[in-house]
Amino acid sequence: MNARTLSSMFLILLAAAPIVVINAGTPDNVSSRLMIHVPHNLYKNGGYDHREALFGKPSYGGSIAQNVFYTESDMCDPSKAIFKTHPKEVNEKGEIYLNPPFILMVDRGNCAFVQKVRNAQRNGAAGVVIADKTCLCSDQECISQQPEGTGCETAEPVMADDGSGADVSIPSMLMFKHDADKIKDVLMSNHPVRIEMQWSLPQPDDRVEYDIFSSPTDPVTRNFFHEFKHIARALGKRAYFTPHMFVFDGERSQCHGSSGENQCFNLCSNNGRYCAMDPDKNLNSGVSGFDVVKESLRRQCIWGTYGESDGIGEKWWDYVNSFESKCGNMDYFNNDDCIKDVYKHAKIDAEMIEQCMENSGGLEKDTSNSFLEAELKAQTDLGVVIMPTAFVNRVAIRGAMTSANVFQAICAGYEQGTKPSICDMCSTCGDPVKCVEHGGCKASFGGPAVAMASGSSGGTVTQSGFFVWMFLVVGCFSAFGVWHYKKTKEDMREQVRGVLAEYMPLEDQEGGFASRGGPGFAMPRANAAQMMMGNMGHSNDSQDSPQQQYTAPGNLL
C-alpha cells in the first residue's frame, strides 16, 4: 500500500467525519428563546424557531432585549462600517448612525458566520441575528411563497465555529427564511422591531450533570483538564461528571469494509469500526489513529472503574493530567513504559484497566467494543457537532472551552435555592480556578472579593469573621496608642520635675543668693514649680491666660 493510497484513505475519513457527528433531531440542542415584543403582530407565543451559534458567550440565565436593525451589508469586510441600515437612525446633524447597544440582523452568505458576527461586534452590536436566504425543503409554507424552480436546502444550517471564534463574545442566532423575511419587511418600512434573546439551562434538581467530549490529542482540553480538576473536586457530589472520548464511526466512514477488512489502515481499531485522525499527520510512522483510539478506550475504562460511582473520579483527573505531563509528547504517547509510570503516579491498578479494555471487546478483533459503541451513541444522542464541547444538563455550552465558561454554566444549572456555596463565591470571579484554590475571590483575580464560608473546602473565614478580626486588630492598636501617649506624657512630667529640683535656688542660709541672680533674687520653690508646670501644660496659651503670666514676688518690687 503506497503513500498515495494512504493519503486518499485519510481524506475519505476526513470528509466523512462531519456526516458522522451532525446526526441529531435538533443539531445543537436549542436551549434559548427568540422573542419579538414589538410590533405586537409579530409576537409569537413561545418564540421563533432558530438555531444558536456554536461560538460566542451567551449569558445563561439572562437575556438581551434591544431594537434590531437590518443591514444590507454582508458584514464580510472588517474595514467597512455598518451601512444601509433599516430603520434609519438620524442624529441632530442629519447623519445616519447606530447608537449601541443594538441587535443587528444580517443576511446569510458570502463569508463564515464567525466573520459576520465578529465584524458586527466591532461595530457595537450586542447580538446578531443571521437571516437565512434559502428555504428548508421540509418547510412547504416557505417554498410555496418562492418563485417556481427556486432551490431549497435539505439540511438545517449549523452556525459552527470556523476555528477562529474564540474572540467573539456576543451571542448570535440564525432565523429561518420565512420568519426572517417578515421581520425584514417591517424594518425596511422604517418601523421598529424589538427582539429579546434568552438563554436558560434545565434546572431539574440540586445536582447538575455535565459531559465533556474530548480527545487524548486535543490541545484545548489539555489546559482545561489541568485547571478544572480543582473545580470538580470543590463541586463534589453536587455535580456529576461524565467524560466522553471522541471517536469516528468507521462503518459509516466506510473504513470497515463489507468483507470485514480494515480499509483505513492504522487509523482504526477493530478492523475499521472505530477510528481517529492521525495526530502527527504521518500515516507511515509515529502516533497513529489506532493509538488515539486505544488511549481513548483506556480513559473510559479508568473512568468506569474509579469515577462512575461518584461522578467525581479524582484518579481519572490525576491520570489524565499526569499523562499530559509525562506522555503528552508524540514521542511517548504510545510508549508502554511511560503509560505504566502514569498508572503508578495516579495510583491506578494497571492490570485491572488492561483487563477492562479486553473485556469490553478489545481493539484487535473484528468485533464491537461496548465502551466505544457507547461513545458513538452519546455523540448521536447529544448531537455533537464540534470537538471539544461541553454539555450541562444535556444542553450544549457555547463559547470557548474554558474553566470559567463551564463553571458558570454548571452553577446556572441548579434548581433555585440549591446552588452550592462554591458557586456563590467563585462563579462570577474573573479567575474561578484561583478562587477555588485560595478559598475565595480576590480583587486581583478579576472579581469582587468574597471569602469562602467556614466549613467549606477552602477553610478560610467568612466575611463577618474577617470584619470582626479587623475590628479587634484596630481596637488593639488604638488602645496601645492611647496607653503609649499617656505614658510618654507622664515620663516628660517626671523629667521636668527632676530638672526643676536640680536647678532651684540655694537655701536661705547661704546668704540669700540665688544660683543665677544677685542678692535677694531667690524664687520660692512652689511658685517656680507651679509656673514651669503651668507652662508645660499650656504652652500654646501662655500669652493669653492671665493665670499663667509670671508675677514677681513682693521682695523683688
Image (cartoon, rainbow, N blue to C red):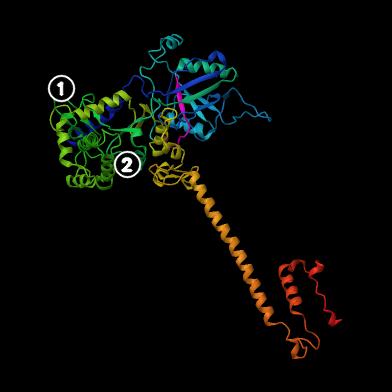
- Residue highlighted by disc 2: 222
The answer to which of 116 and 389 lies nearer the viewer is 389
Residue that appears at 49% across and 44% down: 463
**Residue 487 in picture, x, y percent from top left:** 60, 67
Question: Looking at the picture, how far across and down is residue 400, in whole percent?
Answer: 40, 36
Residue 94 vertical position relative to residue 495 in the rendered view, above or below? above
- Secondary structure at numbered mark 1: loop
Give the crowd class for mark 1: few <14, some 14-19, many >=20 residues within 10 Å.
few
- Screen quadrant of the C terminus: bottom right
Q: CA distance from mark 1 to mark 2?
A: 37 Å
Q: Is residue 493 above or below residue 163?
A: below
Q: Which of label 1 and label 2 is nearer to you?
A: 2
Residue 273 in view (yes/no): no
Identify the magenta region: 165-175
Q: Quadrant of residue 381?
A: top left
**Residue 453 spot, x, y in % from top left:** 44, 42
Badge 1 or badge 2: first in the primary sequence: 2
